[in-house]
């Protein structure tokens, strides 16, 4: 849902981009978004952060509302708790305007209940309907721009809101820290040396942190591939199922990666992966893989041959190996 919403607004913004933003809004008063935020120099006292007390029932409802919001997927547990603390409930009545196109952005909104319509342009063309789920209002806050659309409630409902300053501090600071951490990780992956700096930055932004306890199975041989993994910390055992049971074919550590072969070949997983100890990985989903790792595709295809050679050394003959492709 969130990805589709960004596409709707993205098309609108690209259409408008033929006219410079400075000219379009030159007649307006200076936006509050002239203010800048530098996450690298943010040493704000954590005690000053916004906290809105909630009952257990309210917090449970909020957790359910935000669990599928893409913007929050990269937050760690502490940051997620900060998000939950900072959001406040907003009761909405039918026909209420939540945001209006061209206005300064004040809040980011997550829908708990209700139906909301999005309109753009001078003729306020209807472009999307949010039906009891989703979020809106992030574009103006993330990109220092006036509201790109109008959102009006079609029915009574409930929203969870977060103010501009808190939203930018949590999301932008988290994105900054995440990018720096993952850029260092990706710099250690030989395959990615072919990427330009901006390509590695985009890749770092797309990675999602995941953790596994000792003995956990991360991927299962034969399953459909949903993405690939880069190891941040810990060891991972790669195993292939044979008649006599699973056989370990490799052991990977920090800087290693796995899961890419099934994405390259468009076949089921060729092996299983297990956490040897507590493991932290950075997960890249299949859509981001296809979008961002095109320059590395030839290297990954060559790796298939290396992988087969490695298996022949282990099993003695290719006849004893299930088809990895």
Image (spheres, rainbow, N blue to C red):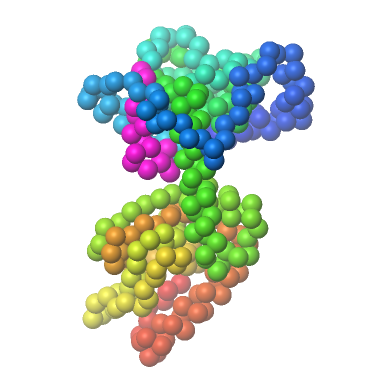
Q: Position of residue 281 (x, y in %)?
A: 39, 57
Q: Quadrant of residue 112?
A: top left
Which residue occupies the extreme bottom position in the image? 316
- The residue range painted magenta reads 72-89
Q: 37 or 234, which lies in front?
A: 37
Residue 310 lies, in percent from the top left, at: 44, 82
As drawn, is 298 to the left or to the right of 88? right
Residue 169 visible in the shown view: yes
Residue 237 forms part of the magenta stretch: no
Q: Quadrant of residue 226?
A: bottom left
Q: Residue at x 61, y 25 (%)?
A: 35
Q: How many marks do you count on the picture?
A: 0
Task: Locate residue 320 relative to residue 192 in the image: left or right.
Answer: left
Q: Position of residue 249 (x, y in %)?
A: 36, 78
Tell me the residue at 47%/84% (across/down).
309
Residue 20 position by quadrant: top right
Q: Nearer the viewer, residue 51 or 115?
A: 51
- Classify 200 as above or below 37: below
Residue 79 among those drawn in magenta: yes
């Amino acid at each position: 849902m969130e990805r589709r919403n960004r596409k709707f607004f993205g098309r609108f913004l690209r259409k408008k981009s033929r006219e410079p933003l400075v000219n379009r809004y030159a007649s307006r008063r200076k936006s509050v978004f002239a203010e800048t935020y530098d996450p690298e120099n943010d040493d704000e006292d954590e005690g000053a952060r916004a906290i809105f007390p909630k009952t257990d029932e309210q917090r449970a409802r909020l957790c359910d509302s935000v669990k599928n919001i893409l913007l929050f997927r990269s937050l760690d547990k502490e940051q997620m708790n900060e998000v939950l603390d900072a959001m406040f409930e907003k009761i909405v009545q039918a026909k209420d305007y939540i945001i209006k196109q061209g206005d300064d952005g004040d809040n980011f909104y997550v829908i708990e209940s209700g139906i909301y319509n999005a309109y753009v342009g001078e003729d306020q063309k209807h472009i999307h309907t949010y039906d009891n789920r989703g979020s809106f209002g992030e574009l103006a806050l993330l990109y220092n721009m006036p509201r790109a659309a109008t959102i009006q409630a079609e029915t009574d409902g409930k929203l969870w809101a977060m103010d501009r300053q808190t939203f930018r501090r949590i999301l932008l600071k988290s994105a900054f820290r995440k990018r720096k951490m993952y850029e260092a990780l990706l710099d250690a992956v030989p395959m990615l040396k072919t990427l330009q700096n901006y390509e590695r930055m985009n890749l770092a932004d797309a990675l999602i942190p995941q953790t596994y306890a000792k003995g956990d199975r991360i991927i299962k041989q034969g399953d459909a591939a949903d993405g690939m993994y880069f190891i941040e910390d810990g060891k991972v055992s790669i195993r292939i199922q044979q008649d006599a049971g699973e056989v370990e074919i490799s052991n990977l550590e920090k800087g290693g990666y796995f899961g890419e072969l099934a994405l390259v070949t468009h076949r089921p997983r060729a092996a299983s992966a297990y956490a040897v100890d507590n493991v932290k990985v950075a997960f890249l989903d299949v859509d981001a893989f296809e979008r961002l790792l095109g320059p590395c595709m030839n290297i990954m295809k060559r790796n298939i041959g290396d992988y087969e050679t490695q298996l022949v050394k282990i099993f003695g003959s290719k006849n004893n190996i299930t088809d990895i492709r």
